[in-house]
Image (tube, coloured by chain):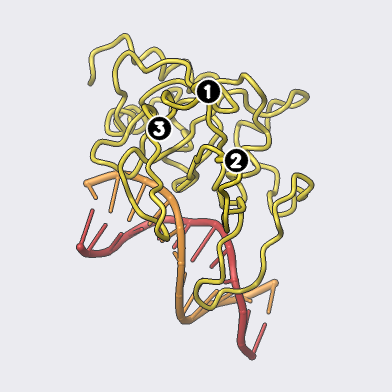
Chain colours: A yellow, B red, C orange
Amino acid sequence: MPKPRKRLAGAAGPTGPDNKGPAGKRTKTKNPVGTSATLGNSSPEKTSASKNCGKNLSSYWLMKSEPESRLEKGVDVKFSIEDLKAQPKQTACWDGVRNYQARNFLRAMQLGQEAFFYHSNCKEPGIAGLVKVDVQFVRMMKRYITLAELKTHYQAHKTTGGPLKNMALFTRQRLSVQPLTREEFDFILSLEEKEPS
DNA sequence: GCCAACGTTGGC
DNA sequence: GCCAACGTTGGC
């Protein structure tokens, strides 16, 4: 899970973005993730995101975060949208993303782009609000859009060819930072105005 | 809490 | 470069 932790100024301790100590037998060291870290592993995505030919990738995103307490190596990873709101400037630095692809998406994000704030690994997973990138609270969703509801649409759209037919939330599971097409983004926004299905 | 899915590690 | 073991994510 991405652990968006507000960057506590000095506090860091052993928590470089990529620093998972030598737990277990895995000890091959990872590259310290400099910004320079190369696109290495990240084969260019074949998703719709990369089809925007000339222009850069997606402008819309979905970011997962856990709203319920859970200890990971002694540290609580809880970070809900309420926690984001409570930050200075309602803004948090999004670190702790380990997955290469998710990290590459993180780098591709540009200031001010919009993203859904998704609550994962919790009682009722779903989209809680809107943020803009670097990561600042924008607003709550007018109603909580649950995973179950999104999935219903996703499944319908697979057969009808609707806007969520390729949604990464379902096709790329475990990706904690993911691009959305504008169609996906708009469709999900439009759900706010409707009765939960 | 369980466990499926899947990414990562690292020996070979 | 394969692939088994292991770790993590995240729904249920």
| Quarter of the figure with the C terminus of chain A | top left
Q: Position of residue A44 (x, y in %)?
A: 70, 43
Instruction: Respond whether the residues carrying marks 2 and 3 are from the same subunit.
Output: yes
Which chain does the residue under circle 2 lie in? A
Give the residue at x 33% y 45%.
A121
Amino acid type, mark 2: Ala
| Residue A26 vertical position relative to residue A41 in the rendered view, above or below | below
Amino acid type, mark 1: Gln
Q: Position of residue A154 (x, y in %)?
A: 37, 31
Mark 3 residue crowding within 10 angstroms, few (<14) / some (14–19) / many (20+): many
Assign a secondary structure to mark 3.
strand
Q: Quadrant of residue A8?
A: top right
Q: Earlier in the sequence, mark 3 or mark 1?
A: 3
| Residue A9: mark | 2
Assign a secondary structure to mark 1.
strand
Amino acid type, mark 3: Tyr
Q: Which residue is mark 1?
A: A136
For discs 1 and 2, the disc positioned in front in the rendered view: 2
Q: Are marks 2 and 3 in contact (CB under 8 Å)?
A: no
Q: Which residue is mark 3?
A: A118
Give the residue at x 42% y 15%.
A139
For discs 2 and 3, the disc positioned in front in the rendered view: 2
Spatial CA span between label 1 and label 2: 18 Å
Given residues A6 and A140, the one toward you in this image is A6
Q: Are marks 3 and 1 in contact (CB under 8 Å)?
A: no
Mark 2 residue crowding within 10 angstroms, few (<14) / some (14–19) / many (20+): few
